Image (spheres, rainbow, N blue to C red):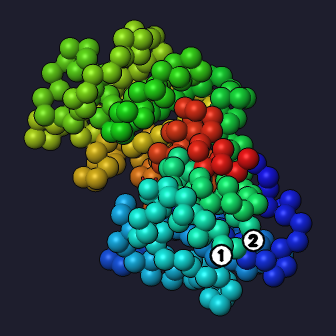
Amino acid sequence: MRSIKAIKNLKGKTTLVRVDFNVPIKNGKVEDDFRIRASIPTIKFLLKEGAKVILFTHLGKNGEASLEPVIKCFFEISKISPNKVTFFDNIRKFPGEMKNDVVFAKELAKMGDFYVNEAFSVSHRKHASVVLLPKYLPSFAGFQLEKEVKNLSDVFKKTKHPFLFILSGAKFSTKIPLLKKYLKLADYIFVGGALANYLLKAKGYDVRKSLIDEKKYNIKKILNSSKLILPTDFVVKNEAIVDIGDKSVKNLMPLIKKSKLILFNGPLGKYEDGETKATMKVLKLIANSEAESILGGGDTITLVSKMKIKNKFSFVSTGGGATLDFLANGTLPGIKALK
Ligand code: 3PG
């Protein structure tokens, strides 16, 4: 990847910057501005070098959402004058984006001289503005994208031990391969959330109405590993596990204390129903530990923002699915496209 610092002459040149301002919106307002803030140094650098900047983002799954709250928030927190930066419409409004359409990407390319990817968190998607547009313009990586790649690569390139990996959430298809890879790399793997329900059921426990994936995965190796740690008590509502219990959190304490590296991904309880008690406790323990700590996952980021402890971690990734894919594969389609 080439850094934006390598661009020779930006003066008067139009730079198309793919950002990911897909942020939670509540009552018409941005609930967590982390992703927006993370892109500002890159945008300010480009402006300082005399470039014209056009920002491209999606918001929501299908492009229906208005960018208005995001645009308002961007100009408020960046203090950049609104006539300096142009926002393209919600990019997913255009069918060519998600279809990864060449004609659409070529049309976009006509709008600028350079392309910058400052959207790590959507770089796992093979969409036109992520993987095709950089093919038609000289392409560069934004500062946050570079930071993400460096910090997340260090997890598997310069792994410190003991290494504790805390993984949970509900997206099985992306998390099972990750579990398999990290069985080799980590010293302890604690699994929570719906992922734990699945493993517990496979072990023969009756998880009643708890959320699980009905698909069959080959998890023999995972179940037999001495590195795997599962929760031992739970918060149960209406016959379904909704969070891990106090004992399970306590069991994690000595591990957090002795670890040199902790990777945390995904909330431990049913986040969408407000079951965040155990997750918050564990995050606090990690924040106050000596370990190098790396966090990922959209809900987790929103939580640490609310708890105002984000700066207590060594690195907080802007990505959700992208972070998981990067940790599993060491790269992403949007990063490969910059080469
Ligand atoms: C995210 O929030 O993880 C990214 O913006 C990607 O969004 P998507 O899952 O809708 O592709």
- In this picture, is 242 found above or below 195? below
* Residue depicted at 59% across the width and 42% down the height: 332
Left or right, residue 291 beside residue 308: right
Q: Amino acid at mark 2?
A: Asp
Name the foreground residue: 302 vs 182: 182
Q: Quadrant of residue 310?
A: bottom right
In which quadrant of this rendering is ligand 1 seen? bottom left
- In this picture, is 216 found above or below 306? above
Left or right, residue 193 beside residue 288: left
Query: What residue is pinned by disc 1?
Result: 111
* Residue depicted at 20% across the width and 14% down the height: 204
Identify the secondary structure beneath mark 2.
Answer: loop
Q: Position of residue 51 (x, y in %)?
A: 78, 78
Q: Position of residue 82 (x, y in %)?
A: 62, 88
> Can residue 56 be seen in the rendering of this structure?
yes
Query: What residue is pinned by disc 2?
Result: 113
Left or right, residue 10 beside residue 130: right
Q: Position of residue 97 (x, y in %)?
A: 47, 62
How far apart are labels 2 and 1 at the CA level?
7 Å
Identify the secondary structure beneath mark 1.
Answer: loop
